[in-house]
Amino acid sequence: MTVLRDSPWYQEILQEGEIRGEIRGEKRGKLEQMLSNIEMTLEMKFGSDGLQLMSQISPISDLESLKAILRSAIAANTVEELQQLI
């Protein structure tokens, strides 16, 4: 086992796994922040009616889609209008 741990291939695989883990963590953080921004916008603009949309929005994991939803939430005049855009 020691020979394997000292192997350059093992070290390279280990390092790549750490890098991928960091990237996944960064992506998760960005998604959580975007969801938080959307939630805050919905609450500020539409109150509890807007927050009800979070059950539809929360499962979305595509950052670009969430950005589009945030833009739509800012531009929409009513919850119904926003729901149609989602």
Image (cartoon, rainbow, N blue to C red):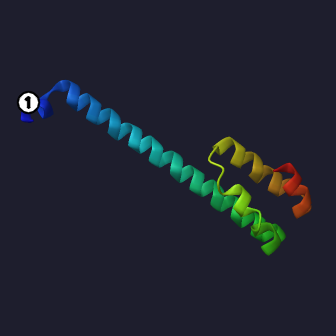
Residue at figure coordinates x 76%, y 68% from the top left: 52
> For this view, does 78 lie left or right of residue 3?
right
Q: Which kind of residue does numbered mark 1 sit on?
A: Val
Q: Is residue 43 above or below residue 31?
A: below
For residue 32, what is the image quadrant? bottom right
Please indicate whether residue 28 sits to the left or right of residue 38 in the image.
Answer: left
Residue farthest left in this picture: 2
**Residue displayed at 48% across by 47% down:** 26
Image x and y of residue 27, in percent = 52, 46
Residue 13 visible? The answer is: yes
Is 36 situated above or below 16? below
The crowding category of the residue bearing disc 1, from other C-alpha atoms within 10 Å (few below 14, some 14 to 19, many at least 20), is: few
SS at circle 1: helix
Q: Quadrant of the N terminus?
A: top left
Q: Residue at x 7, y 35 (%)?
A: 2
Residue 6, position as x, y percentages in the image: 12, 31
Read off the residue under disc 1.
3
User: What x and y, as percent, mark residue 67?
Assistant: 71, 47
Q: Residue 83 at what x, y percent from top left? A: 85, 56
Say if residue 47 shows up in the picture: no
